Amino acid sequence: MQKEIEDLINETINNNSLVKVNDNLYLKKYQIEILNYYHVDYKNCSSISEIILLINEIIDNEEIEDIDTLEEILLSLQEFNYYHNTNK
């Protein structure tokens, strides 16, 4: 039981660690995995806003079986973008 809890904690930490995509962009590992799975070209983006646009295009223009996962990433990026890039 203790080992399972430790493994879960380590996996969560690993999946949520930030990866530098370029000078302006950092994403969590699990976000990168999902974006790669759906062939979102995030590596050529210079901002979260650009990634959000790409994801919206995919959601609007393609038939995707498990769209919930991609929408979850979209929502997390939108929330991050709002709190970090909106003047309040």
Image: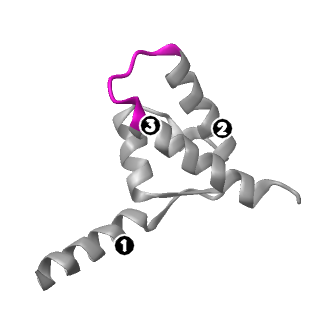
Q: Which mark is residue 46?
A: none
In this view, 40 is above or below 83: above
Q: Does the magenta-highlighted stretch encompass residue 53?
A: no
> What is the chief secondary structure element of the magenta stretch?
loop
Relative placement, left or right, of 14 versus 23 is left
In this view, 36 is above or below 54: below
Q: Please provide percent x and percent y for residue 24.
A: 66, 56
For the residues labelled 2 and 1, say whether their Cβ atoms are less than 8 Å apart: no
- Nearer the observer: mark 2 or 1; the answer is 1
Q: How many marks?
A: 3
Q: Which residue is mark 1?
A: 13
User: Are there few (<14), some (14-19), or many (20+) residues within 10 Å of tag 1?
Assistant: few
Q: Which residue is mark 2?
A: 50
Task: Give, as a three-letter code, the residue at label 3.
Answer: Leu
What scheme was used to colour the molecule?
A: one colour
Relative placement, left or right, of 47 versus 70 is right
Q: Please provide percent x and percent y for residue 2.
A: 14, 85
- Quarter of the image where one finds residue 5: bottom left
From the image, which quarter does the N terminus lie in? bottom left
At x 40%, y 30%, the residue is 67
Of helix, strand and loop, which one carries label 1? helix
Of helix, strand and loop, which one carries label 2? helix
At x 88%, y 57%, the residue is 87
Q: Residues in magenta? A: 61-68
Task: Give, as a three-letter code, the residue at label 1.
Answer: Ile
Q: Earlier in the sequence, mark 2 or mark 1?
A: 1
Mark 2 and mark 1: Cα distance apart in space: 26 Å
Mark 1 and mark 3: Cα distance apart in space: 21 Å
Task: Give, as a three-letter code, the residue at label 2.
Answer: Glu
Of helix, strand and loop, which one carries label 3? helix
Q: Which residue is mark 3?
A: 70
